[in-house]
């Protein structure tokens, strides 16, 4: 029961991040992507060996989402410049604002991605399989 709850709980947060990245890049919400990611990640996490494996994989996916967030902000800002501006001054202002937003998202995404990656790779230690052979001493 604990593995199912952890799989669904971790997959919810991973799917939420995927939803935010795709919705920002597409400029409209895609609930279907959230549901597909939630169901797919829940199944994938449930197939992992232990709960530690579930959370290790989820933190690595959090890192990937954090690294992709600046790209989504850049796509959103370019889409805004192309579709929502009328004059040259508006285009320049939107481009400057988009550049600043992309820079902030890049800094925060990189920082959060490194933290999530370190948690996923280093903090959640999974012991290696140790087998003891009876009567064999080193």
Image: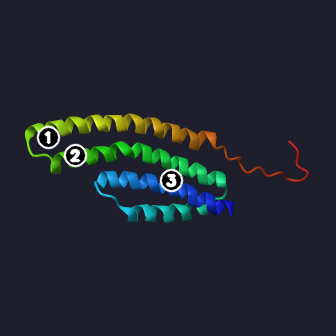
Quarter of the rendering occupied by the N terminus = bottom right
Left/right placement of residue 128 relative to residue 107 reads right
Which residue has dot 3 on it? Answer: 13
Q: Residue at x 68, y 60 (%)?
A: 2
Q: Specify the quadrant of the image occupied by residue 29.
A: bottom left
The residue drawn where x is 16% and y is 49% is 84
Spatial CA span between label 2 and label 1: 10 Å
The image position of residue 78, as x and y in percent, is 22, 46
Residue sitting at 45 percent across and 54 percent down? 16
Please tell me the numbered disc located at residue 78: 2
Pointers 3 and 2 in contact (CB under 8 A)?
no
Q: Earlier in the sequence, mark 3 or mark 1?
A: 3
Taking the image as shown, residue 86 lies to the left or right of residue 22, namely left
The nearer-to-camera label among 3 and 2 is 3
- SS of the residue under disc 1: helix
Disc 3 to disc 2, how far (Cα)?
Answer: 27 Å
Residue under pointer 1: 91
The location of residue 86, given as percent across then percent down, is 9, 46
The reply to whether dot 2 and dot 1 touch (C-beta < 8 Å) is no
Residue 111 position (above or below residue 73):
above
If you read the primary sequence from the N terminus, does the residue marked by circle 2 or circle 1 appear first?
A: 2
């Amino acid at each position: 029961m604990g593995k199912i709850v952890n799989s669904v709980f971790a997959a919810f947060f991973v799917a939420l991040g995927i939803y935010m990245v795709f919705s920002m890049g597409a400029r409209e919400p895609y609930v279907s992507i959230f549901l597909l990611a939630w169901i797919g990640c829940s199944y994938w996490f449930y197939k992992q060996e232990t709960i530690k494996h579930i959370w290790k994989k989820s933190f690595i996916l959090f890192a990937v989402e954090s690294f992709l967030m600046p790209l989504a902000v850049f796509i959103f800002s370019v889409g805004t410049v192309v579709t929502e501006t009328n004059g040259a001054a508006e285009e320049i202002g939107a481009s400057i604002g988009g550049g600043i937003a992309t820079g902030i998202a890049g800094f925060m995404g990189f920082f959060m991605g490194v933290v999530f990656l370190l948690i996923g790779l280093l903090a959640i230690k999974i012991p290696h399989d140790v087998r003891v052979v009876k009567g064999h001493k080193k």
